[in-house]
Amino acid sequence: MTQLTPAFCATNGIIITRLEGKLIYFGLVNPDTILKTRISKAFPGYQCIFEEMESEAFNLRLAQLYSEEPEGGFRSEGKDSRESIIDKVADDAPIVNLLNSIFLEALLKEASDIHVESGCEETYIRFRTDGLLVSVKRITNERAIAVSARLKILANLNVLENRRPQDGHLDVKTDSYSLDVRISVVPTIWGESIVLRLLNRSDTPLSLDSLGFSEGNSAYLKKITVLTSGLVLVTGPTGSGKTTTMAALLKELDIKRAKIISIEDPVEYRIPGITQIQVHEELGLTFDALLRRIFRQDPDVIMIGEIRDIETAELAIRAALTGHLVFATLHTNNAVEAVYRLQNMGIPNYMAAAVLRMVIAQRLVRKICPECGSSGCACCGYTGFRGRAVVAEFIQFDTTLSDMVSGGIAIEQLRRYLQGKDFKTLFDDANERVALGITTESEIRRELGAAQ
């Protein structure tokens, strides 16, 4: 059977998608009658079926076609084989296109991270999609060395260094996307483990209404946007959407009339009108060091990517006490624990009570796939889930609650007080999502654990 060359596919926007007996299916970016006739004549004895194809899907398939290993592939030839692979990688088209295909597939599957993990005999490519890792590809360890070298070249890292960890970043651009990719390379017993965090600069922070909070919790978010001073904490584990929530809150503020400064690691969303500062610990630009400096920048609102230590916590409290509105994140399991985390860091009860205005705890749970209803299909990668929804709990501080915290109330007493105020926990919000058919009980247990 006649084969289409990669060059012909790229020029004409056509590619073979599958072969079923005497049926050949083609993907076409721009349907063209003349091209269809030409292709049909080139495949006598076959019935040619033409299907319209999105450009991103076409680019992925084309990159995969270009990334096929050359005849015989790479071969290890003694102790210098790694160096010989590195020497040729910069100009090796299959490796360049293999990497392109990995990025394109990750984008199409809406992955947040790409993992390249060396094993004893093969290297595994995995994507983190909707919070879970999924295996997507296996390549030879020789090709993995070349992929690693290519990534290091793009990130301006030491290509020959494979004994020490390295961190960096690179830019990836397509017709539709602009990515800031954070790269972490760590040596292992089999080779290297590479993790690529994909930060899509093409996306803009979501509006509060489209974040996916419940109606009741959305009302709490609206209250935050009218605050003029105090401390708002957003809590949850890594990957729970804290940064997205804070970005959406900042976007709702009056940017034209207020000086808003954020200190982040990394800067995930670019927001016009906001002064955003990247943490660089190797240069001494830590959260606390930058916080000390920005007081001279006359800010009205300050966003702190994460409170990691007592120094940062004290500066955040100081900023809130002096009339600033401060947003910050903490790693705690729920909103109640966040109040006591500040105490554990060394912040006096009366100071925390004086500045706290709202504490949000949130998680992301996978949503039931709208196409298959959780049974599994191609759209959801046969997982039964597609996309994620927010479940959250909010503590709004009133005078009574502030007085209780200032007086050193025990955590169980605080919980009982909140229950009497119709406080909805993460589990309450999650169970409502199950009742509405948005997610499942098993997904709630996976993300939140057993109900407390």
Image (tube, rainbow, N blue to C red):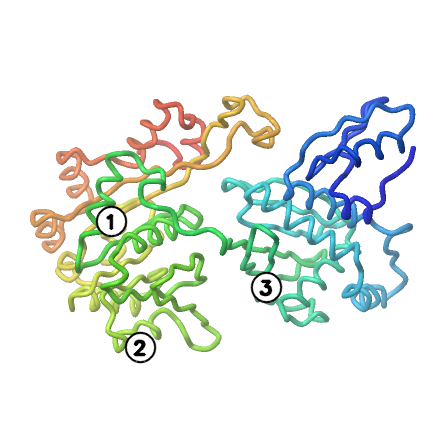
As shown in the figure, which amino acid type bears the numbered disc 2?
Arg
The mark nearer the N terminus, 1 or 2, is 2
- Say which element carries label 3: strand
The Cα–Cα distance between marks 1 and 2, rounded to whole angstroms, is 26 Å
Question: Residue 421 placed where, x, y %?
Answer: 13, 36
Question: Residue 301 placed where, x, y %?
Answer: 25, 63
Q: Residue at x 66, y 51 (%)?
A: 117
Question: Residue 374 placed where, x, y %?
Answer: 51, 24
* Left or right of residue 130, residue 437 in this image: left
Q: Residue at x 84, y 67 (%)?
A: 84
* Left or right of residue 262, residue 26 in this image: right
User: Where's the C terminus, which quadrant?
Assistant: top left
- Say which element carries label 1: strand
Q: Neighbour class for label 2 at 10 Å: few (<14), some, many (≥20)?
A: few
The Cα–Cα distance between marks 2 and 3, rounded to whole angstroms, is 28 Å
Q: Nearer the viewer, residue 420 or 429?
A: 429
* Left or right of residue 33, residue 163 in this image: left
The mark nearer the N terminus, 1 or 3, is 3
Q: Which residue is mark 1?
A: 359
Q: Residue furthest front?
A: 34
As shown in the figure, which amino acid type bears the numbered disc 3?
Leu
* Residue 186 in the image: above or below residue 225: below
Viewer-nearest of discs 1 and 2: 2
* Residue 392 in the image: above or below residue 21: below
Q: Nearer the viewer, residue 104 or 373?
A: 104
Viewer-nearest of discs 2 and 3: 3
The Cα–Cα distance between marks 1 and 3, rounded to whole angstroms, is 35 Å
Q: Which residue is mark 2?
A: 293
As shown in the figure, which amino acid type bears the numbered disc 1?
Val
Q: Which residue is mark 3?
A: 170
What number of labels is visible? 3
Q: Residue at x 31, y 61 (%)?
A: 303
